[in-house]
Structures are given as structure tokens and as C-alpha cells.
Image (cartoon, grey):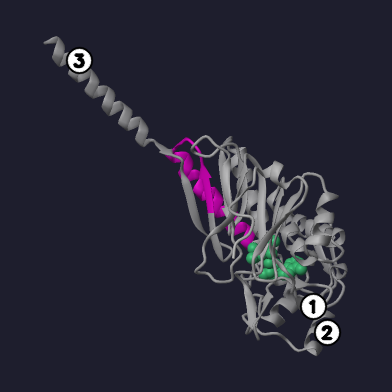
Amino acid sequence: MARKKIIQIVIGLALVLALGVKSLYVKHPVLIGKTMGTGYNATLSGYVPRATVKNLRQQIEGELVEINRQMSTWDPKSEISSFNLSDESEPFEISAPFAMVVARALELSESSGGAFDPTLSPLLNLWGFGSGGEERKVPADAEIAATKALTGWRKLGVGVDSTLRKSIPGLALDLGAIAKGYGVDAIGQLLDEAGHENWFVEIGGEVVVRGLNPKGKPWRIGIQYPSSNPAVDKLQGIVNLTEGAVATSGDYRNYIQQDGVLYSHILDPRSGRAVLSDTASVTVVAPNCMDADGMATALFVMGADEGLTWVEERPKVEAMFLVRGADGEIFEKFSSGFTTATGYVSGKQTHK
Ligand code: ADP
Ligand code: MG
């Protein structure tokens, strides 16, 4: 055989082999799907075997189904829904992860002076923000007072044996402010345990990252400009992270508008009323997403002055408040370590 011919065959074989090997891998796989009334996204940097991607997808989907079976108030058969329907004051058995999330929620209720409260379910339904499907409206003061009597985190107990206990019959749980963050942590743990080092996980805007993005840079997480007009889709700034969680709570996507006033879906448990303040959103950076998610909600209730003092007392937690000025312009207010810890790049100091 001619030498030229042999070379051609060798090159051909090498090409076939290379293409074959390549098709066994997925470059920077992105796994997306629906959960918790929103979407999830898990992105890995680098080449991942196709079989591994398939396996990860199954594990993630399975984990999310399990979390919803425990903690979703939208599923009438979930553990949380069964607990909410029960009028018993006897200990109610639940799964260990659900008990852990409730324990963490109660710690946050205590440390935030009641700004966070996982027992707001009856009030959320009254305002039309709950899973009961009621109409969204600003309730009458008397209705708020009567319903508020059914809430209160001190009326809820969680046992180390994974049990819940209510001290009044009407008490009901809502983990909407913390469950997405927990879900993000759970998926992150899955990726971690499978040995992946560079990834991004998100559910409905709550995020955890590790390592580097597909470009070999820190992960870039956009912070939404808080406009109540869904047509205005722009960024306030960008957080750059190689490790940790980011969560944002705001009043600009989920609210009641009545007589020109925006009533946010976050309630102040102490008044039973929607939070009305100059805070448009709060972004929290913390080591895990369950804490970041819960703290973002609690800080939204506290407001910038009280909230930033609270954040300064907590190591490894940083926050940014986006505050509305008199003319609707947005101002950024940071905890002392926010920009350093997150490499925050602001789009502009103020937008109109
Ligand atoms: P989002 O769901 O828009 O990401 P949050 O994480 O702030 O926003 O969660 C808001 C949800 O938390 C509400 O829809 C409600 O279910 C619940 N919630 C509202 N106010 C409080 C509060 N003060 N403490 C705990 N949970 C709350
Ligand atoms: Mg939250």
C-alpha cells in the first residue's frame, strides 16, 4: 500500500475515534425543568459523560419530587398539607429533612425578632397570597386581627425525633420563603457528592455555585432591577462568586395593587399586613441557600436600617438592599462586606 494511503486511513480512524469519544460526553451540560411553581437550572462546567448527565437528571428530578412530597402546600397530599389539616395537638410524624427545615425556620423566627414566621399560612390565604386559591385583596382590619390569632411561630414545636406539634388547632405552616433555598442546597449536595467541582444550581432565582463557569471565570449572577413592570427586564448589577449562595426577595413581581399602592406578598407577622416600605428588594449572600432565602425574606420585613445592623452581627452573611427614592429611583445599600465578598459590579448607582 502506498504510504499516502496508510496515512489517510490512520487520520480517518483517529477522526472516527475522536468523534465517537466526544459523543459520549456533553460539553457544559445544562439540566432544566419545572418545580415549586417555577423552574430549576443545574449547569456543570466542562465535559461530563452522557450517562452521568442522564443519571444526574434522574436524581435531581427524584429529589425535587421528594421535597415537594414533604414540604409543598400546593400538593394536598404532602406531609405539610396533612399537618396543616390536622387539628391534633399530639406530635405529628414527618420526614427528617422537613423537620430540619422547620427547625431552621424557627431559629430564624427567633433571631429576627419575629420578622420571619413559618406559620403565616392562614394570613397568606386571607390576603390571597397562599395556596388556598383565594382572591387577592386587602382584607379588613377585623379579618386581619382574627386571622392573626391563628398564627405565631411560638405555637409550633419541632421534636428531635422529626415530629411537629401545634398548640392551637388552626395553626398551619408555609415554607414558601425557605423551601426553594433548601431545594437548591439539596441539588448542590447531590452534585458535590457525585464529585463535581464546577457548577451552578438555581430554583426561581435562588442560587448556589461552586468553582468556575464554562469560561473558567467566577459564576456571574445577575441582580434584577426591581421594576413592577414585567416588560422592564434589566439588571441592577452582577454578583461574581466561586462559592456560596445568593437569594433575593422583592415586592416587584408578586403583589396586590390597590389605589396606587403596592402590597407585597411578604407579610409583617407582627402586624399581619403586607410590608409597605421603601425596600424594593433584598439580596443576601450566605454559605447555604436555605439560610440566604429565609434571611432575604426576614430582611425585607426588617427594612434596610434594622436589617443591615442585623446582617453586620452575622459572620459570612452579606446583604444588599435596593431602596426606592422619592422619585422612584433605586439606591443600593450594602452591608460592609458585600462588594468585597461578591465582587459586585453595579450597572449604575441609580436608575430611573
Ligand atoms: P419568592 O417566593 O418571591 O422568592 P420569598 O423567598 O421572599 O420570595 O418568599 C415569599 C413567600 O414566603 C411568600 O409567598 C409566603 O409564602 C411566605 N412569606 C411571606 N411573608 C413571610 C414572612 N414574614 N416570614 C416567612 N414567610 C413569609
Ligand atoms: Mg425567601
Q: Amino acid at mark 1?
A: Gly
Residue 291 lies, with reference to residue 189, above or below; the image says below
Label 3 vs label 1, nearer the camera? 1
Q: Is residue 13 above or below residue 158?
A: above
Pointer 1 residue Cβ closer than 8 Å to ligand 1: no
Estimate the spatial distance between the alpha carbons at disc 1 and disc 2, rounded to whole Å. 7 Å
Please say if the residues under marks 1 and 2 sit with CB atoms less than 8 Å apart.
yes
Decide: few, some or many residues near mark 1? Use Cα within 10 Å; few <14, some 14-19, many ≥20.
Answer: many
Q: CA distance from mark 3 to mark 1?
A: 79 Å
Look at the numbered discs 3 and 1 and tell me whether their residues touch, using CB distance below 8 Å: no
Q: Which residues are magenta?
A: 41-68
Task: State the image coordinates of residue 238 (x, y, percent, origin top left).
Answer: 59, 49
**Residue picked out by circle 1:** 272
Label 2, secondary structure: give it: helix
Upstream in the sequence, badge 3 or badge 1?
Answer: 3
Residue 347 x, y percent position in the rendering: 58, 53
Indicate whether 276 appears above or below 99. Answer: below
Q: Position of residue 304 (x, y in %)?
A: 78, 61
Question: Among all residues in the image, which is located at the extreme left?
Answer: 2
Residue 140 placement, left or right of 8:
right
Q: Which residue carries the number 2 mark?
A: 145
Residue flagged by tag 3: what amino acid is it? Ile
Q: Is 61 a magenta residue?
A: yes
On-image quarter of the N terminus: top left
Q: Is mark 2 within 8 Å of ligand 1?
A: no
Q: Is residue 80 visible?
A: no
The reply to whether the magenta stretch includes residue 213 is no
Q: Please report whichever mark, 2 or 3, sits nearer to the chain's N-terminal start.
A: 3
Occupied quadrant, residue 331? bottom right
Q: Residue at x 80, y 79 (%)?
A: 170
